């Protein structure tokens, strides 16, 4: 059986001696620090450290070295238990030292009582204590107690069933050119579509240190599903669904669904062409060469250049279209524009404008020009 080397105090009439016992089966040799620690704990303040070194050197040369370290006598030293713990109380270790030749050994009851007096109140591994005492495993660290570690919880997690980080990276063709018309910036959703799923947080379980104190698990992060209009949560608040077909965005952890796709600026290289199942509202202009297609209405707050607009509903241009011979507007409903110039217009309803110039206009219902110009 593997055993570390150890030492023993031997009381004789002429003084106190240190006696060595060799390591067995590859055990660790004696260390002066171990001896000094023990002697300090036992309040041997008058020790000459050079004698300790002399003893260590002698123990390396012979099996049972004997070196006197103190003149005179003292009371017998009983078997001694040194307890060490880590600051958090995750574990406690026992290190036994033998009694002097005239001292007494500890019983298991003695050892457990001393451990309790040292603050070790929980997680005692009695079989290890019994093993240390039965085998007299001196100058050896033995695991005496282990904490019950807390079981860590799990943070809440939200899984979005759409691309929450939609980017406007243009497509690159086989010849290496970039097509700024095909940016695909719209994240489309259908009515009833599952938008997000919340996996709730799981609280951790408290543990207990060897000191008997609670060991707290880390706090978990709780989350809730947040949404604006046109979305709802399931009864258990764990799933989010779209109420309409349209587009979805994620802003500051809140899901926004709309059946109107809003373009905050111009339709151009930054947006690409627009093809949307619903209505489209454009805050800026529609630049020449770009196409806007919607199954619903198209509203443009700015001007339209030589672009193509195709709506399943109506088209409303608040400023008008300067088509430059390339402008095309087709709508199943009405087309309403402040002015129409150099464009081809086809309406399934009315065409209403203040001025129409140099344009081909077809309306299923009527063409109404309220201004003074029509060429």
Image (cartoon, rainbow, N blue to C red):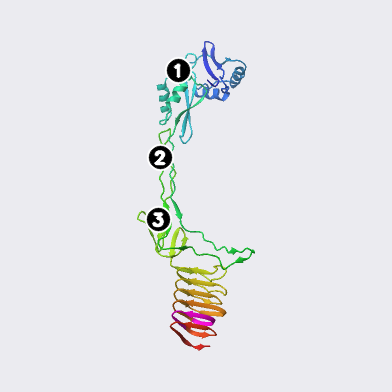
Question: At x 43% / y 56%, what residue is drawn?
Answer: 196
The span from disc 1 to disc 2 (Cα, nearest Å) is 38 Å
Q: Which region is colored magenta?
A: 338-352
Query: Which circle's residue, 2 or 3, is located before the other in the chain?
Result: 2
State the residue lying farthest toward the right: 175
Which dot, 1 or 2, sits closer to the camera? 2
The span from disc 1 to disc 3 (Cα, nearest Å) is 67 Å
The span from disc 2 to disc 3 (Cα, nearest Å) is 30 Å
**Could you say which disc has been placed on residue 239 in the image?**
3
The residue under label 2 is 206
State the residue lying farthest toward the left: 235
Residue 209 at x, y percent in the picture: 43, 35
Which of the 4 quarters of the picture holds residue 24?
Answer: top right
Mark 1 lies on a secondary structure that is loop
- Answer few, some or many: residues within 10 Å of disc 2's Cα (few below 14, many 20 plus, some between 14 and 19): some
The residue under label 1 is 105
Query: Which circle's residue, 1 or 3, is located before the other in the chain?
Result: 1
Residue 285 at x, y percent in the picture: 53, 74
Q: Nearer the viewer, residue 288 or 146?
A: 288
**Could you say which disc has been placed on residue 305 in the image?**
none
Residue 230 at x, y percent in the picture: 40, 64
Q: Is residue 350 magenta?
A: yes
Which of the 4 quarters of the picture holds residue 228?
Answer: bottom left
Q: Are marks 1 and 2 in contact (CB under 8 Å)?
A: no
Using the image, determine if residue 302 lies above or below residue 4. Answer: below
């Amino acid at each position: 059986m593997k055993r570390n080397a150890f030492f023993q105090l031997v009381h004789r009439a002429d003084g106190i001696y240190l006696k060595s016992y060799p390591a067995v089966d590859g055990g660790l040799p004696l260390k002066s620090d171990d001896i000094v620690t023990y002697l300090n704990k036992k309040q041997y303040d008058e020790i000459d450290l050079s004698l300790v070194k002399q003893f260590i050197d002698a123990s390396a040369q012979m099996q049972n070295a004997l070196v006197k370290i103190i003149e005179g006598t003292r009371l017998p030293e009983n078997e001694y238990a040194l307890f060490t713990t880590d600051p958090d109380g995750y574990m406690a270790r026992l290190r036994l030292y033998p009694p002097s030749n005239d001292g007494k050994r500890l019983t298991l009851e003695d050892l457990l009582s001393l451990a309790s007096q040292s603050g070790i109140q929980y997680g005692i591994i009695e079989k290890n204590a019994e093993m240390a005492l039965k085998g007299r495993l001196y100058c050896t660290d033995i695991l005496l107690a282990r904490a019950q570690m807390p079981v860590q919880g799990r943070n809440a997690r939200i899984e979005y069933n759409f691309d929450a980080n939609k980017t406007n990276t243009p497509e690159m063709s086989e010849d290496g050119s970039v097509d700024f018309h095909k940016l695909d910036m719209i994240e489309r959703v259908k009515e009833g579509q599952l938008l997000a799923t919340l996996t709730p947080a799981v609280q951790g379980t408290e543990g207990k240190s060897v000191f008997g104190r609670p060991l707290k698990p880390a706090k978990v992060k709780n989350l809730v599903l947040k949404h604006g209009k046109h979305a709802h949560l399931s009864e258990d608040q764990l799933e989010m669904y779209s109420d309409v077909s349209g587009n979805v965005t994620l802003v500051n952890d809140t899901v926004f669904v709309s059946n109107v796709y809003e373009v905050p600026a111009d339709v151009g290289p930054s947006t690409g062409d627009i093809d949307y199942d619903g209505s489209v509202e454009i805050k800026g202009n529609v630049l020449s060469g770009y196409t806007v297609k919607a199954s619903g209405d198209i509203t443009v707050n700015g001007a339209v250049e030589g672009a193509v607009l195709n709506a399943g509903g109506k088209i409303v241009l608040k400023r008008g279209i300067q088509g430059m011979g390339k402008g095309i507007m087709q709508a199943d409903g009405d087309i309403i524009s402040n002015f129409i110039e150099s464009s081809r217009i086809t309406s399934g309803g009315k065409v209403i404008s203040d001025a129409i110039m140099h344009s081909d206009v077809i309306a299923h219902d009527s063409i109404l020009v309220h201004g003074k110009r029509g060429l």
